[in-house]
Image (cartoon, rainbow, N blue to C red):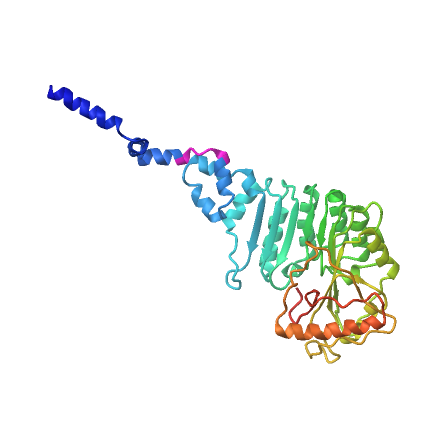
Amino acid sequence: MKRVLSGNADDSNSSSDGPMDSFKRLRQQSEDPADAESKWACLPQEILLHIFQYLPLLDRAFASQVSRGWNHAFHMPELWRCFEFELNQPASSYLKATHPDLIKQIIKRHSNHLQFVSFKVDSSTESAEAACDILSQLVNCSLKTLGLISTARPSFMELPKSHFISALTVVFVNSKSLSSLKIDDTPVDDPSLKVLVANNSDTLKLLKMSSCPHVSPAGILCVADQCHGLRELALNYHLLSDELLLALSSEKHVHLEHLRIDVVSENPGQQFHTIKKSSWDAMVRHSPKFNLVMYFFLYEDEFGPFFREEIPVTHLYFGPLCQQGGPGSGGHELPAPGRAGGVRQRPASPGRGADPHRGALPAPDRHRAGRVRGVLQRLRGVCQDVRTPPLAAVHHGGGAHP
């Protein structure tokens, strides 16, 4: 009789357990370490891919050792579409270089997955050579974006021109949908640009090639004539021509969004050509919302050609100006403009046109910018369209060439 009562009591206690008590018992039974590890190892590939996309490369590499499934996820093509190669000499650079073994693995297993690639190199020639060696091996990939970035002095310019062109041409030939190309401070030349146009004229939208001394006005004109989808362009003033502006203003060409011009003096007394007002007018009619960003790095007596005709500039920046005594001898005043000149500043379009240097200026720069503002105010008497720009849009910096 006692047994029966005891059994009934047990049943009564079990029936009185709440849902939380039942959940705790099940949880205790299932908390076997081996079972937990096996469940983590069996996560679906879609979930692993989503998690891995938020992890740094080194953490992904460690995670790939958990199981075969995780290792397989580590090598999924979606994780290797975007990669930045950092190449430097440890003895002379603070940057952390991409490990050589990882570079070999990428070329062996993932070169055909790469789509958005950049190379960040220090000032050593060895790093630039390493970048070219990698480029020359990307024969099975079709890149969409490529950027060559020199973190210090332009080390790509120290390479033999033929070696650099050969490596770059490999990418141009094998990439049929290149949309963005940043090759500032490189020995790219006209023939290599023709190869670029022949293979990517329908897709190229952005081209940055400031300080490329081996490119001629005819070379960049070839790009503008055939790459009708080009929306952003950066180049030095010596490549700018009336023909180039008219090509960018043709009916076949899309509206230009961003044009950056670097006006750099190579030696005192350098003569600069003048762009016709009619060419600028055609550009404004075709692309009324485009942003024209101009950087000036000139001696004091070289500003004449730029104040004879109206320029529809939206962002105007001045580097350190030099007096006749030579570079660095001082002089922060702009030369007095000629009688028939003027700079017409159009309002900048929002978004892409904003330059990274915009914003509040430190006290010394505000003082220099005030002088620049005074010069532009004097221009109002010469050109009715001149308007004093906002302080944030005029930067009179004292730093190195950006």
Relative to 152, 206 lies left or right: right
Provide residue 144's location: percent of width, then percent of height.
66, 44
Would residue 242 be visible to someone looking at this image?
no
Determine which quarter of the picture holds residue 357. bottom right
Q: Which residues are magenta?
A: 40-46
Q: Is residue 68 above or below residue 188?
A: above
Disc tally is 0
Task: Based on the picture, tell me whether residue 41 belongs to the magenta stretch.
Answer: yes
Q: Is residue 384 left or right of residue 264?
A: right
Point out residue 308 in the picture as x, y percentages from the top left corner: 85, 68
Which part of the image, by quadrant, shows the N terminus?
top left
Query: Where residue 71 sits in the image (x, y, percent)?
Result: 46, 38
Judge whether residue 250 can be spotted in this image.
yes
Relative to 260, say whether 113 is above or below: above
Quadrant of the snapshot with the C terminus: bottom right
Question: Going by the image, does 66 lie left or right of 214?
Answer: left
Q: Quadrant of residue 344?
A: bottom right
Pick whichever, 92 or 78, lies toward us: 78
Give the quarter of the image for residue 342.
bottom right
Identify the residue at horizontal 60%, vertical 49% (top origin): 134
Say above or below: 37 vs 259: above
Residue 193, position in %: x, y?
A: 75, 50
